[in-house]
RNA sequence: AGGCGCGUAGCUCAGUGGUAGAGCACUACCUUGACAUGGUAGUGGUCGGUGGUUCGACUCCACUCGCGCCUACCA
């Protein structure tokens, strides 16, 4: 391999990582220049997590936008950073601790948190390394972590200010309680899914002995905490019972029968047991009727009722005992199978209990109002737009946000209590002491709240906390509001809405102008990728390749349900019998971009990435060809004399059109169209046609030097532009080739990254050249069609006759004779003039020009008849349709004149062509057997 | 119950009020000096269904069938 020529085969592994290191060390990722600011905040991945397909997809999109804008001269910042991911991270470390036979409680809070920091130091670099493998041009010099001092300070500031404005409050409320993790979680972290259960019908005797009511429940164990039975006020069946009391079975407590509209008379028996301490609806009923609230569960969700035989039993164990006891007492009327929704924690998968505890809440409604307005007014635009309805739907029905978590890993709530339960919310313990001293007139012991904040609380500040807020930094001034947020729809509520609310509240303006909402990557079968399903693909495996055994190993180790392993192994072997080949980062990125359509689900199909790996290879080899033909040659630089032929002007025109298409696509976040435009240009036009045409010019001994210089110039310059056009999607291969090609194209600069993005120049769209090469392609196509359909070897030299051409046809022929002969493998091209009758030929039409291939031994009569017949049939169908259109007076009168005119022209052309082909068909048929 | 999305070639997906597209797969021929991770040609769709608007509907509207997601839920 010489210095100027590329290696024979495209090997992504050899080129990618070294380039990234050079870029990073050169400081190319940091914002520079005085252009308008462009900023994207990375959705911070979990600090101890690893890169999954969703990340890789999202980061590809962001990097494409960032590189595109950077090349356009924007002062571009892609903010790097990670999230402390409270529950997730704590769980990981706790599990490791448990594996050592210890619990976090044995360790104590301080030591446990220290362990987590150690774990972060140990594994925190993985995801950032993986992002580098993806080519992500994040500004690592500005990397942030949500628990950095600066960001923690922002959290404090926001908490204190919201508290001072009464937008944060503490209260004893029914919350979603995770009995495994021992913490409250927000509504959003609860996953409710239908499961099989039972509906137990239980007899509740009236105290006055006048009978009983039957209540239906899915949770009989909560009856221990019943404080009423409710019926609908209009339910005639139970009107007389309202106001009476019931002796609660097993407990023998007397509880009232009340009337409340909440009850659906049509469901079950129409009587509902009310347990305000353990059901959200019952809690509301309890509030309305001033019912006592009796808690019967421990934080572990075991029965907590001193003196009861069920005390200490887990809720599910208690359930079966209670049902058995009721049955024994003759109070169980019946048990129905019943499907109902069961709430589970998204992290622990434990059944969530509504549980009465002291928690901190954000009063969301006042914050939601301006956040709704911002989207209504268009200060923030969702792309695609339909996501705004989802956003509105949620924001208009939003409930207060429970932000306290009974965890150890996270931002500790900046609230201190005195011994009388007084609360001092402050930026520091010292400040809290001052406040306490002011209240009590002396120093008193204070104790800080044990809880930490929901991770999403700090994430909500990400767009400004990373830029230094509450300090008014230069970065904050420059980059806030950021340009666009790129995210999946699954976290619109968790994250996007909350960033908007907090951004408006604390900065007075929206955190981003646009929200590009992309779909979720699924497997080839449309299943969500998850560890437990064993269908995870690791983006790095697609880049580097993975052997089948290793892949199976990755998918089957550490499963929650190890019994699924054989099934997962079988499915994996079926889908990837030979493992996964290495495709390189560029191919993976291009694949993601091509899949970025407007839909919700994205099925990841291995065929796509293979195709794009081939595309890389195509580009690589095209570049090799160009370098082989231009390196060390005159390429029309520095005033060197050159001339451009139609082919050159054509490919230059097509380049402009492609550039315009690409700009249009990326400005509308249509990365799929961007990939398609570039792919088609490079493969189908530059490689398939221009390279082939250039070979002819360069090999033609009769061709002028100027034309040859012009051809070389065009080869390198169009390639160089195409590389820049492609760079945001395929950073590595484009940089590698660019380094070789740029000098030949008269470009200097150390990296393609910092070059200008190509912009279409409409004055370079030469319509004549487009027509001329279009003509050439049609004539070549006509010959190839005949060749192909009749199975004539591509190299078998043919003679072609052209007849009935227009002045343009002969003009084009004159200039493209050599090209036509070479591309169509023609030995001779002759023009039939005047009354010369053509020999028996296979015939095709290009406009009115007849392309005739005389029938010789190479031509099969039956094949030609078949070929013509096929064309005739198609033409007849089209013609019939066109004619009936024109025969419709309404069409002729009402359709726009140009549409009608076009239809007439088309019909005439088809008519002529059909006659020609039919005549030809008859002529061939009349020949004797071949 | 409310909201949203999807249904186009065997598969994965674009698309537009005016003659249906791409990639992959498939078939035939071809190892021609950039590339077999390649070349050339070709097969393949009454655009889920019904009705309406229109000169004209795959496209707009209504209804309908099927699939999926989200939110809120009847104990």
Image: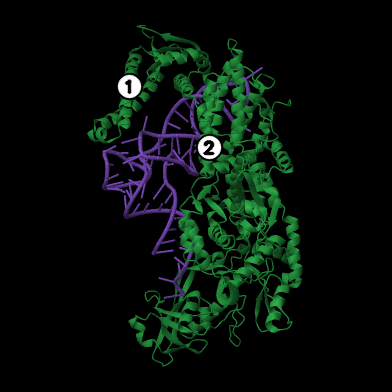
- Chain represented in purple: B
Residue drawn at (60%, 31%) of the image: A721
Question: Quarter of the image containing the C terminus of chain A?
Answer: top left
Which label belongs to residue A121?
Answer: none
Residue drawn at (66%, 76%) of the image: A424
Viewer-side residue, A173 vs A281: A173
Which quadrant of the structure image shows residue A151? bottom right
Report helix, strand or loop for mark 1: helix
Viewer-side residue, A146 vs A320: A146
Viewer-side residue, B37 vs A690: A690
View extreme (bottom): residue: A208
Which quadrant of the structure image shows residue A318? bottom right
Q: Position of residue A139 (x, y in %)?
A: 68, 48
Q: Which residue is mark 1?
A: A914
Could you tell me which chain the residue with mark 2 belongs to? Answer: A
Could you tell me which chain the residue with mark 1 belongs to? Answer: A
Shown colour of chain A:
green
* Label 1 neighbour load within 10 Å: few <14, some 14-19, many 20+: many
Position above or below: B41 against A817? below
Position above or below: A904 against A823? below
Q: Position of residue A296 (x, y in %)?
A: 57, 81
Q: Which residue is mark 2?
A: A662
Viewer-side residue, A196 vs A529: A529
Label 1 in the same subunit as label 2: yes
Q: Is residue A618 left or right of residue A108?
A: left
Q: Position of residue A691 (x, y in %)?
A: 57, 23
- Distance, label 1 to label 2, CA atoms, is 39 Å
Asked whether residue A124 appears in the rendered view, the answer is yes
Q: Is residue A675 left or right of residue A579?
A: left
**Sooner in the amino-acid sequence: mark 1 or mark 2:** 2
């Amino acid at each position: 391999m010489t210095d100027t020529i590329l290696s024979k085969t495209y090997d992504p592994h050899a080129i990618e990582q070294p380039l990234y290191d050079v870029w990073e060390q050169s400081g190319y990722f940091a914002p520079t220049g005085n252009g308008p600011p462009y900023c994207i905040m990375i959705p911070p991945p979990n600090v101890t997590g690893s890169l999954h397909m969703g990340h890789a997809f999202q980061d590809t999109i962001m990097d494409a936008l960032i590189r595109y804008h950077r090349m356009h001269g924007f002062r571009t910042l892609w903010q790097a950073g990670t999230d402390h991911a409270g529950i997730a991270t704590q769980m990981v470390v706790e599990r490791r601790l448990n594996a050592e036979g210890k619990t976090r409680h044995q360790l104590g809070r301080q030591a446990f948190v220290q362990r987590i920091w150690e774990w972060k130091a140990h594994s925190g670099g993985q995801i950032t390394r993986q992002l580098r493998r993806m080519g992500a041009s994040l500004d690592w010099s500005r990397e942030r972590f949500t628990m950095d001092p600066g960001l923690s300070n922002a959290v404090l500031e926001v908490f204190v200010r919201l508290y001072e404005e009464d937008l944060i409050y503490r209260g004893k409320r029914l919350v979603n309680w995770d009995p495994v993790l021992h913490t409250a979680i927000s509504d959003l972290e609860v996953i409710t899914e239908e499961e099989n259960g039972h509906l137990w019908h239980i007899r509740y005797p009236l105290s006055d002995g006048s009978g009983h009511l039957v209540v239906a429940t899915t949770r009989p164990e909560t009856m221990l905490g019943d404080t009423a039975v409710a019926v609908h006020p209009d339910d005639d069946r139970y009107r007389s019972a309202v106001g009476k009391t019931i002796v609660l079975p097993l407990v023998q407590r007397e509880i009232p029968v009340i009337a409340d509209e909440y009850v659906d008379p049509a469901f079950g028996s129409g009587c509902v047991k009310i347990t305000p301490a353990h059901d959200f609806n019952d809690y509301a009923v309890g509030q309305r009727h001033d019912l006592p609230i009796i808690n019967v569960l421990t934080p572990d969700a075991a029965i907590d009722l001193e003196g009861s035989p069920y005390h200490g039993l887990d809720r599910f164990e208690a359930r079966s005992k209670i049902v058995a006891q009721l049955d024994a007492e003759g109070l169980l009327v019946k048990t129905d199978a019943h499907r109902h929704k069961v709430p589970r924690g998204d992290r622990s998968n434990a059944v969530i209990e509504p549980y009465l505890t002291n928690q901190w809440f954000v009063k969301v409604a006042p914050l939601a109002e301006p956040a709704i307005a911002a989207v209504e007014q268009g200060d923030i635009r969702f792309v695609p737009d339909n996501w705004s309805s989802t956003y509105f739907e949620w924001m208009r029905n939003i409930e207060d946000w429970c932000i306290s978590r009974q965890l150890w890993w996270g931002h500790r709530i900046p609230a201190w209590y005195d011994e009388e339960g007084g609360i001092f919310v402050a930026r520091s313990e010292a400040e809290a002491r001052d406040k306490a001293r002011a209240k009590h007139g002396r120093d008193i012991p204070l104790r800080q709240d044990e809880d930490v904040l929901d991770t999403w609380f700090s994430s909500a500040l990400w767009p400004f906390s990373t830029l230094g807020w509450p300090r008014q930094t230069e970065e904050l001034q420059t980059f806030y509001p950021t340009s666009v947020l790129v995210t999946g729809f699954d976290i619109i509520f968790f994250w996007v809405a909350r960033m908007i609310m907090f951004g408006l509240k604390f900065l007075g303006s929206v955190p981003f102008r646009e929200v590009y909402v992309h779909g979720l990557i699924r497997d080839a079968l449309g299943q969500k990728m998850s560890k437990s399903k064993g269908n995870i693909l690791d983006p790095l495996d697609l880049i580097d390749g993975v052997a089948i055994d290793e892949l199976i190993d990755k998918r089957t180790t550490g499963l929650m349900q190890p019994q699924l392993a054989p099934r997962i192994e079988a499915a994996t072997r079926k889908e990837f019998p030979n493992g996964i080949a290495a495709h390189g980062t560029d191919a993976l990125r291009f694949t993601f971009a091509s899949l970025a359509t407007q839909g919700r689900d994205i099925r990841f199909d291995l065929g796509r990435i293979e195709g794009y790996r081939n595309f890389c290879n195509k580009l690589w080899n095209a570049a090799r060809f160009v370098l082989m033909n231009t390196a060390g040659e005159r390429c029309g630089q520095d005033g060197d004399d050159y001339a451009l032929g139609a082919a050159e002007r054509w490919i230059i025109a097509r380049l402009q059109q492609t550039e315009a298409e690409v700009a249009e696509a990326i400005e509308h976040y249509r990365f799929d169209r961007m990939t398609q435009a570039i792919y088609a240009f490079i493969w189908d036009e530059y490689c398939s046609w221009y390279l082939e045409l250039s070979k002819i010019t360069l090999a033609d001994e009769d061709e002028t030097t100027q034309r040859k210089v012009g051809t070389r110039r065009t080869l390198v310059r169009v390639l160089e532009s195409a590389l820049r056009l492609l760079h945001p999607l395929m950073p590595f291969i484009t940089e590698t080739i660019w380094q070789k090609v740029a000098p030949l194209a008269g470009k200097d600069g150390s990296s393609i990254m910092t070059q200008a993005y190509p912009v279409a120049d409409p004055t370079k769209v030469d319509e004549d050249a487009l027509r001329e090469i279009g003509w050439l392609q049609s004539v070549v196509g006509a010959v190839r069609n005949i060749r192909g359909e009749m199975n004539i070897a591509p190299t078998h030299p043919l003679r072609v006759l052209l007849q009935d051409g227009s002045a343009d046809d002969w003009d084009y022929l004159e200039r493209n004779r050599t090209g036509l002969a070479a591309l169509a493998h023609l030995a001779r091209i002759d023009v039939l003039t005047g009354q010369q009758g053509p020999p028996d030929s296979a015939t095709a039409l290009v406009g009115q020009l007849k392309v005739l291939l005389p029938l010789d031994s190479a031509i099969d009569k039956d094949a030609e008849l078949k070929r013509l017949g096929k064309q005739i049939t198609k033409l007849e169908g089209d013609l019939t349709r066109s004619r009936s259109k024109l025969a419709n007076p309404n069409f002729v009168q009402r359709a726009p004149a140009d549409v009608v005119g076009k239809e007439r022209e088309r019909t005439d052309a088809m008519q002529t062509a059909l006659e020609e082909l039919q005549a030809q068909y008859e002529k061939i048929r009349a020949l004797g057997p071949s």
